[in-house]
Each structure stands twice: as C-alpha cells, then as structure tokens.
Image (cartoon, helix red, strand yellow):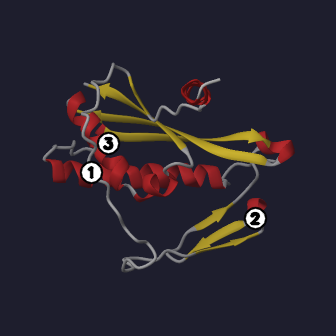
Amino acid sequence: MSASRITTSLIRQAPRRVTISSTKPRKPSPSVAPPRRFLNTDTAPVLYSARATVMGARNGKIRGSEGLKVELTMPKELGGDGGDGKTNPEELFAACYGSCFQGAMNLSAKQMGITMPAKPEDNLIETTLHMVGDLSKFDLGVRVDMLIKVRGVKKDDMDKLIEKTRETCPYSRAIKGNVTTNITVEEVS
C-alpha cells in the first residue's frame, strides 16, 4: 500500500470532533485563522485565587474561601444515593463553566461592539456536563453541551461572538483538546 493511501486511510479513521452546532447552517470560516493568544500560566501575574477544601470526596462537603458551603452526594446514575439539597462535581463544573463562558461572552461582546440584552433572563446559558465512558473499567471522561439563548443579537454576530468567547474563556482554554464542547445557539425573538 502506498504512503498516500495509508495516510488517507488513517485520516478517514481519525476521530472527528464537531465543536459548534447551530439551529441554522453556518457560513464557512474564513481561510485565515485568528491570531492565537499565548498566556504562560506559570509566570502570569495572579489576579485572584479561590480556595476550596473538600472533605469526604463525593459523599462529603466543600467549604470555600468566599463562603461556599456545599454538601456532596454520588449521583444515583453513578451508583450513589443521590439526595435533595446535595450536588456533585459534575453539576458544579457545569455551573462554573457556564457562568465563566457567559462572563467571557459579555466581555467579548463589549470589545466587539455587540450590544447584549440588559435583562439577565434574555441572556441564558444552559450547560450540561455528561460523564461518559465505562465505570466498571474506571475509564471515564466528560463531554459538555452548551445551549445559548440570547435575545436580540443577530445570528452572524452570535457566531463571531462565540468564536471569540471560545478563545478568551478561561474554562474553554483550559479544557481545549481534552473535552468536547458542543455549542448550540437558539435564536430568541
């Protein structure tokens, strides 16, 4: 088999990752990629530090440096008891990622001259973290689905805004290449 056939075969077998979806077809991206940001997190100045203490793992509690008090439980789907008024790391990650993405999106919109809605209920992000894999083999990972609903922003502007936000959101940058994040934009009129 020739080298080009082997390469073509390997490319066909390579996993494909779709990272953005929309309710409408997207225009092709320009051929010139935006400049890549480089931040050396080892040497960058610290702007803020959050601290949390975990006791008892998935069936324990978390206490944070800013007053966070959370009781944890293992979800029933993962073999635990579940429980009202308690949460788990997956739910916390979904909440943190969604709020961080929304904050980065609002800052990016301001930089881009895009006017975001004034009412909080007109700018929503629903984030779902899926625990995936094989629990019996302890071969686990996560996948994220993010549904963005923003009233009054044109689709083209939203597409550009989401691309910019993926480049600037600290959570998106931290998990890039490790966690698939599927983003769907739902137009709200």
Callout 3: helix, strand or loop?
helix
Please indicate whether residue 35 sits to the left or right of residue 129 in the image: left
Please indicate whether residue 109 sits to the left or right of residue 163 in the image: left
Q: Is residue 104 above or below residue 117?
A: below
Q: Earlier along the polypeptide chain: callout 3 or callout 1?
A: 1
What's the residue type where badge 1 is placed? Asn
Calculate the distance from the C-alpha at mark 3 to the C-alpha at mark 2: 36 Å
Label 3 crowd (10 A; few <14 / some 14-19 / many >=20): some
Evaluate if marks 3 and 1 touch, with contact meaning CB atoms under 8 Å apart: no
Please identify the quadrant where the C terminus is shown: top left
Residue at (63%, 63%) from the top-left corner? 70
What's the residue type where badge 3 is placed? Glu
Displayed quadrant of residue 21: top left
Displayed quadrant of residue 54: bottom right
Residue 153 visible in the displayed image? no
Q: Residue furthest right?
A: 136
Q: Earlier along the polypeptide chain: callout 1 or callout 2?
A: 2
Which residue is identified by label 3? 163
Residue 57 numbered tag? 2
State which mark lies toward you, 3 or 2. 3
Residue 48 rendering spot, x and y as whole percentages: 40, 76
